Amino acid sequence: MLSKNPRTRIKDSPLSIEAGERYRKQFARPDEQSRGYTDSELRNVAEFLQAQFNTGINMFGALKKFSGAWLSRSGPLWMPFMEVPASSINTPVDGARRFVAQSWPFERIRALGRAFDGTFNDAILAVCAGTLRLYLANHAELPSKSLKAMVPISLRKEGDLDSSNAVGFLSADLATNVNDPAERFAVIKASTHAGKQFLHDLTVNEAQLVSTLLQVPGMLLLPLGLMSKLPPYNTIISNVPGPRQPMYWNGARLAGMYPASVVTEGIALNITMVTYDKHVDFGFMACRRSLPQAQRLIDYMEEAIVELEVAAGKR
């Protein structure tokens, strides 16, 4: 329903029944049966069949590499449940929520990644880490051990544009126990690099199996109400790419795209962001009881960005 052209006019609301019917007709499958299969569809079928054939091999390889990484804990590679500190973020949640949203210029965030020889995602994590550190410190709740975050990443190999979507998860060290912003960025960068390297050294199927294995303990703890006592990580931080140009509806420019994610028992804060046009739109979803004054998170985020800019010599 949104358009790149501000002059485009659409009669119905994007939430109307008429719009839904028109959308279904527009993307309905053709009635004729002679369409044939696309290369992408055939490739997906082939990948599925191969995955089923190799399940035993993939499972064995995934278990071997997963257990090796877990038992030989060394360097910047982290796994869920490894030295995850207790915090107010990891408490039982109730039904009250607070949603906080704010936008920052895309180039401002990307400049931080370049200044510290890291990626845009490293900069996002460093900004979120500084935000959480300031919030917890101001509530006298900053743990001596560093917070850990679950970070979804794409497992698609470079140059692979056609195969099925593949998403994995890594456990990132947020270095919230490090006072210096530059040192904190370096720890985060090393952690994410180690996690990505571990997953990319696996086949796509092995990596997906490992990502599933990483989530199984939490899935078992959740029904028992033990997630707050044995959290696999402290929070979830997700970066979702959005349209890089302005979008319009009947000439009205879309101001922002603020993602509202969910919190679960024992994980009372979820941070999600969408890159849209020339800015990054952050959405913080928090349990209001577990994280009082969560609206201050956007103030602390600005402080965290300024801290990094000062450390990078940009102020």
Image: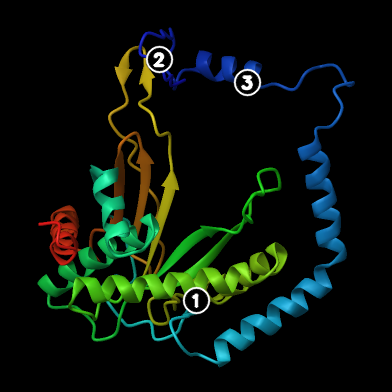
Residue 309's disc is: none
Sequence-first tag of 3 and 1:
3
Q: Secondary structure at mark 3?
A: helix
Q: Which residue is mark 2?
A: 5
Task: Name the residue nearer the viewer: 201 or 221.
Answer: 201
Against 261, residue 32 (above or below) is above
Q: Quadrant of residue 24?
A: top right
Tag in front: 3 or 2: 2
Along the line of sight, the residue nearer the viewer: 172 or 290? 172
**Residue 128's x, y, as percent?**
28, 62
Q: Nearer the viewer, mark 1 or mark 2?
A: 2
Q: Amino acid at mark 1?
A: Leu
Element type at marker 1?
helix
How far from the left and from the top, in percent, is residue 290? 25, 66
- Can residue 99 be seen here? no
Circle 1 packing at 10 Å, graded few (<14), some (14-19), many (20+), is few
- At 50% across and 90% down in the image, what residue appears? 73
Give the percent coordinates (x, y) of residue 307. 14, 64
Q: Residue at x 84, y 32 (%)?
A: 37
Q: Quadrant of residue 276?
A: top left
219 with respect to 259 (left or right) = right
How busy is the neighbourhood of tag 3: few (under 14 within 10 Å), some, or many (20 plus)? few
Residue placed under numbered mark 3 in the picture: 24
Which of discs 3 and 1 lies nearer the camera? The answer is: 3
- Residue denoted by label 1: 224
Q: Is residue 17 left or right of residue 113?
A: right
Q: Is residue 250 left or right of residue 139?
A: right
